[in-house]
């Protein structure tokens, strides 16, 4: 990052900004501009493959028809693609993804229309060695089908941080990105090879042995290629909007972007693939 814009230097957390955020708590709004308004055979498959999930329940309608579900359904995180715009507040203050949880009420079937509303449900001040002052925001998304039946609720947490403060504190400055030796890559590939894919084979109560190990599922190592695949399934939200659409979005949200090393305005979501910007906000590398 060769240039720090005035907007970034001024992006600090203030009492007024916190008060403005808290004033939005409980106000339910339509989630406009969803990447997917419908769960279809294609959109479900694209999301599953974008996360590296080969489960045919999410990709093959003929296979899915033979399962107890009677047809294709979407994995719960597919709902990320059905989130449109929502009230962020605090323009120019960075947002660190902290987690999400899904409360599922009904399967998301291929062909379903997904109608989403969102409200800011909590705002809490936090302090850490990494960021100093921070604000944890919680949003609740409610997903219904076209008939109004409740499908699921998604709760999403973001930690808002001051980019300058995190960078200047430099908590993770000395940490170097990992470099994988061939032997380490071979061990990862062996782990993939050992993974048990049960498919449609049921696991009955009497088949479970007390103390039996639940083998973890390995993913990675994470590459930019993986992130591109994920964005293909996830969609352009929250900020990846190319060319004129992106220009129009930036005009509506002038505190959103900062300049990259070429002097071009770009979105904060690039922290996941642009190591230069990741270091600008205080992280070690893009991820």
Image: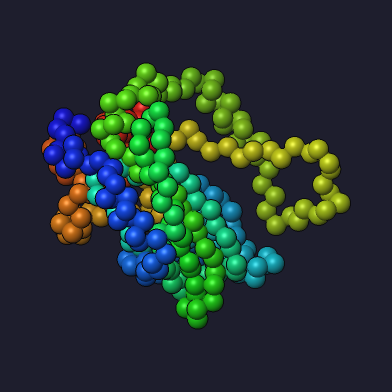
Q: Quadrant of residue 42?
A: bottom left
Q: Quadrant of residue 95?
A: top left
Q: Nearer the viewer, residue 209 or 57?
A: 209
Report x, y in % for residue 235. Answer: 36, 56
Q: Nearer the viewer, residue 243 or 46?
A: 243
Report x, y in % for residue 115. Answer: 43, 72
Report x, y in % for residue 20. Answer: 30, 56
Residue sitting at x 35%, y 36%: 133
Report x, y in % for residue 135. Answer: 38, 44
Residue sitting at x 66%, y 36%: 194
Is residue 85 left or right of 210 when viewed as pictured?
left
Residue sitting at x 37%, y 24%: 171
Q: Quadrant of residue 68?
A: bottom right
The answer to whether one can see residue 93 in this image is no
Is residue 194 left or right of 205 when viewed as pictured?
left
Q: Residue furthest right?
A: 206
Q: Quadrant of the C terminus?
A: top left
């Amino acid at each position: 990052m060769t240039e720090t814009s005035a907007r970034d230097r001024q992006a600090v957390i203030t009492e007024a900004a916190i008060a403005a955020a808290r004033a939005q708590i409980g106000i339910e709004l339509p989630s406009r501009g969803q990447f997917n308004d419908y769960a279809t055979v294609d959109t479900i498959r694209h999301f599953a493959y974008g996360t590296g999930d080969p489960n045919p329940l999410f990709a093959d309608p003929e296979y899915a028809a033979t399962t107890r579900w009677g047809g294709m359904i979407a994995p719960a995180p597919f709902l990320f693609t059905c989130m449109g715009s929502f009230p962020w507040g605090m323009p120019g203050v960075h947002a660190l993804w902290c987690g999400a949880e899904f409360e599922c009420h009904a399967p998301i079937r291929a062909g379903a229309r997904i109608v989403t509303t969102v409200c800011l449900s909590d705002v809490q001040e936090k302090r850490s060695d990494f960021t100093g002052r921070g604000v944890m925001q919680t949003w609740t998304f409610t997903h219904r089908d076209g008939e109004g039946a409740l499908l699921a609720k998604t709760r999403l947490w973001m930690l808002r941080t001051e980019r300058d403060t995190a960078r200047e504190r430099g908590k993770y400055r000395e940490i170097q990105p990992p470099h994988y030796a061939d032997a380490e890559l071979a061990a990862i590939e062996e782990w993939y090879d050992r993974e048990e894919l049960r498919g449609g084979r049921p696991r009955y109560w009497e088949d479970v042995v007390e103390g039996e190990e639940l083998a973890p599922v390995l993913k990675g190592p994470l590459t930019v290629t993986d992130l591109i695949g994920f964005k293909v399934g996830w969609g352009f939200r929250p900020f990846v909007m190319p060319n004129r659409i992106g220009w129009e979005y930036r005009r509506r949200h002038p505190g959103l972007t900062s300049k990259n090393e070429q002097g071009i305005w770009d979105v904060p979501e690039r922290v996941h693939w642009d190591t230069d910007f990741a270091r600008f906000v205080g992280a070690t590398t893009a991820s």
